[in-house]
Structures are given as structure tokens and as C-alpha cells.
Image: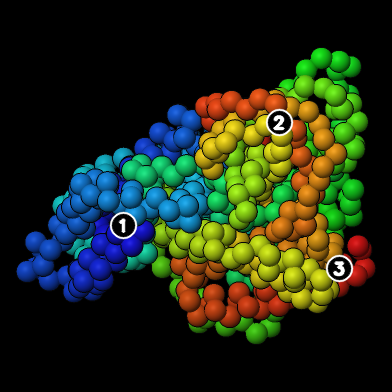
Amino acid sequence: MNRQAQSAILFVLGAALLHAGLTDLYLRYVKAGLRPLVLAAGVVLIATALATAWYEWRNKPKEREQKEHAHREPLVSWLLVLPLFALILVAPPALGSYSAMRTGTALQQSYGVQKLPASGPLRLSLADYAGRAVYEHGEGLAGRQITITGFVALDHSGAPYLVRMALNCCAADAQPVKIGLTGQIPPVLRPDSWLQVTGTYTAKRTKDTVNGGPIPYLEVTVAKPVASPRDPYDETWNN
Amino acid sequence: MAVTKAPPRTRDTAEDPGEDRHPAPEQEARRLNSPLVLTLLMVLVVLFQGPIRQALGAPVMQSWMTVFVAVLVQALPFLVLGVLLSAAIAVFVPPSFFARALPKNPVLAVPVAGAAGVVLPGCECASVPVAGALVRRGVTPAAALAFLLSAPAINPIVLTATAIAFPRNPEMVVARLVASLLVACAMGWLWLRIGRTDLMKPPARESYEGQGKGAAFWGSVRHDVMHAGGFLVVGAMAAATLKAVVPQTWLRAAAENPVIAVLALAALAVVLSICSEADAFVAASLTQFSLTARLTFLVVGPMIDLKLFAMQTGTFGRAFALRFAPATLVLAIGVSVLTGAVLL
């Protein structure tokens, strides 16, 4: 690969990172906090591309001969075109039900659980509900209307779960937190579609078949489809 | 994936080597090839994006692609940071600085360089190019290797993340720091004793003599991104494959035997290639495993994984990486078990 081609690849790679960072695309792959770094990397890559092109153009006559003998970049550099195609043309979606059902629930006991408001309907994050249901034995949840958002995943038998992937750094370390759905479930559920379910606490539990982790249930009364959130991952572990 | 992957490789092997080694006048025309190939490739992929997308529609492939892109988007900023640092070392820091900063005696320089890893806040992608630049700047390889191994594991960001991930086990942070430093120093000393300079690839790069500092700086950045970036892609592909294909139920079976648990998590750390800033959270979620096994995961991961192995091959040569990586792995497992027995 000669310098012009390298310059082109660096430029497009930088532009792809800038594009991902300036839109919400990057949230499908990494945590929100990485945004400044992604943008800075894009800028540096574009600057490198421009500098390469400029020095190449300026030094042309003088360097020609020297360059003939200089070692070139290895073939492996060509692989850098793969992430370009993947990011620009395909832009794969955030991890969904396929990874969720292959991975065990990552529910963990959290410390310093905040007190819930004493009465009225509750809007909880999925991991918050699951944590309170399993480790606080549903304290303060019984008899209240609870609203939770997540995406649908079905296990081998077709039983529905509501899932949110929790993320610490990038999608490679994303892990699901699952709750089971029971009660008035819509007859047709499409995996990966986002749902906002409203329902009540139930003491029903099951064990994740993958890692034996606890999965609490929610007794559904209403379920309505919603658009996927801006950040598809639950990043509360980062704070 | 086969559709996008095949063209660069086949075209490449056919054309680039000839272009590389036999610069002859009649090949003047062929020199145009790499930009031409790149353009053709892009046009082809754009033309056939419909079928390509369809081929990638299966859930396995989508999840593979997501993890692949995620590893790259996450690692590229740190790679760029490391590459900038490495270029700055190569161009602006005179070799005499390192001669003064490190003890003359290489045996003492190893722990000093290992402890200096504290100052590079980043993950393992940043440390490979920096270590390469240190070697080129005349730092004794043993000390540079100690730095390479310790920097991703013991910097403040990583230790803080570990503390947050293990709120009930603060001793995990101490154990990680101690075990990582021990392995880094031991590998440095081991290199002093049995390492041979001919194993390490001579610093493959154009000399920047006679160029302006700007040209040298950007030349170094370009060179390192193209090299390490290509190998990073290899590592990301391997990590995505294992994440999307290996069933997690295997882990459950492995956790039951203490010896197998340690070995399984060491192997997992190698194949998952998770950024060292995030691995503590993954370790914390592997609740079915013992603390010692999880410590092994945290010590092995930042020192040797598929992505790092590919990058080390690119920077220091295959002969080096093939010997260095297994030695590091064995030592890291041994030290983790010992540290775990004492501290956890």
C-alpha cells in the first residue's frame, strides 16, 4: 500500500469515527463517556491523513528515489478497510436478544439502594426493578404500578423476557439483566422490539439457564411498543 | 463477511509484494495500484451493499459485527493516544533523557520502568506502540517490556475501576497491583537472563534523519496507526468470533473445579481481549468463580490477549511474540495463584 492509499484510509477512518461520534451511532458500540475520545481520535486520524498527503506532495521529487527502498506497510494494514465498511455501510445494531439469551443475567446486589417514593406509580430502570425484586424481596414494590422499558427476548420454549444490556466500556463487555414477563402479555412478541410494560410486583422467580442467576418476574397489565432509547445500553454501572 | 474480507487479501497478495521488493522502472504503472485497488474495492462494496447486508442479517453475524466494531471504536482512541505519545518520544525526547531517567544497571531499571507504568492512563492498546518507541530510543528492552506489561494493569483509571467493580473486596485492588507488578518485573528480569536481541525484530521503520520534526512526527503517527491498526483489526475479529460463538454454559461447568476455574478464566481473558479499563466489571460478574480465578483474569487480560498478541507480532516480530506471550501467560497465572493464596 503506498502513501496515497494510506492517506485515504486514514482520512476515511477518521471521518467514520467523527461521524459515529457526532451522531448517536457511537452509543451502539461504546459508553457515552468515550465520546470526546472518539472525536479526538477522528480529528487526529484526519490530521495524519492530511499531513501524509501534504508531505508526500511537497517531497515528491526529492524523496522518490529514497522511497523506492523504504519499507512499505505490511499487508495487514489492508484489514483497516474492514471496520470502514462495517461502520459506514452496515452500521450494525446494538446488541440485542441473540446475545442476551446466550449470556447469563448479570444482576448483582447493589449497595446504597435509594428509598422509593412512598406511594403512587413507579418508573424504574430494568436493573433497578430486578435488584429490588431479588435482593430486597420486593420491599416497597408490592401493590404498586411499575413501569419498565426494555427489549423483548424469547428463550427456547418461547417464554418472553424483558432485557436491558448493561455496559461498562464497550459492547464487548455488555451483559444482560433480564426479567420474566407474566400476566397479560401481548399475543405476538417480536424479539428485539422495545416495550414499555406496566405491571405489578410478583414473588415469582426463575433461574437463568445459562449461569443460574436469579430472574424476577413482573405481572404485566399493559404493554406498549416504544421506540428504542437514544442510548440502548444501561450505563448506570459507570456512575 | 466473506464478501468484504476476500478482495483486499487476494488482490493484495498478488500485487503488493512485487511492488515492494522489486522497484523496477517497468513497474512504474503498477505503483498506481494500491489507490486504484482501494477505490475499486470501495465502489464494489457500495454497489453490492444490498447483498452484503443481506448476508450479514443473521443474528450471529450481527452480533459478531457489533462486537467487532465496538472493540475497534473503543480501542482506536487509546491506540491513537499511544501512537501520539510514541511519536512524541521518538521525535522530541532525546535518547539521553532515558539514559538519565532510568538506573544504569538494567536489573534496577526493570522495576523502575515497571512502576513507571502508573503514569500511562489508558488500556493495553496504548502501551504497545509506546514500548516500541522506548526500545527504539535505546531503553534496555527488559525495562521497556516491564513497562509494556505493567502500564495497562496498574494505572489509576484501571485500579479505580477495579475498586468500583469489587465494592466488597478492596483487597482485590491491592492483589491486582501487586501481582501485575511482580509479573512485569519477573518478565523483565527473565528477558535480561535468557532474552536474545536477535529475537526482537530490529526497529522496522524508515529513518527520520534529514527530515523536519513535523514530517518525522506525522510519519511516525501514520506508520504506527497503519501497523498497529491492522493488527488491532485481527484481534477484534478474533474477540468478536469467540464472544459470538463460544457458549457461556461451558463457563458454568468450569467454575466447579478450582484448578480448572483458574485456567478457564485465564483462557477467557486471552480470548475475550477486553479493554483493561472494563475487565474488572466483567470479572465481577463471573460470580460463580473464586476470587483467585477472577484475579487471574484481571492479571492475564491486560498482559496477553489475542489483540495484544497480534499487535506485539506487528511491533516486535513473530519470533519474539511466539516466545514472549506463552511465558507471560504461564508466569501471570502462577503469580496470580500465589498472590491470591496470600492476599485473598
Q: Nearer the viewer, residue A216 or B327?
A: A216
Examine the rendering and report whether any part of residue B340 can be seen.
Answer: yes
Find disc 1 in the rendering and name its residue.
Answer: B4
Residue type beneath disc 2: Val
**Real-space Cα separation, disc 2 to disc 1, in angstroms:** 44 Å
Residue drawn at 55 percent across, 38 percent down: A189
Q: Residue B180 placed where, x, y %?
A: 76, 63
Number of other residues with Cα within 10 Å of mark 2, as a class: few under 14, some 14 to 19, many 20 or more: many
Are the residues under marks 2 and 1 on the same chain? no
Please name which of the two marks, 2 or 3, marks the residue nearer to the observer.
Answer: 2
Which residue position is annotated with label 3?
B339
**Amino acid at dot 1:** Thr
Residue A158: assigned label: none
Q: Position of residue B58 (x, y in %)?
A: 43, 53
Reading the image, the residue beneath label 2 is A220
Number of numbered discs overlaid on the protein picture: 3
x then y, percent, for residue B293: 80, 66
Give the camera-side residue of B244 and A69: B244
Residue in the picture at 38% in, 39% down: A16
Q: Amino acid at mark 3?
A: Thr
Q: Is residue A230 visible?
A: no
On the same chain: label 1 and label 3? yes
Circle 2 SS class: strand
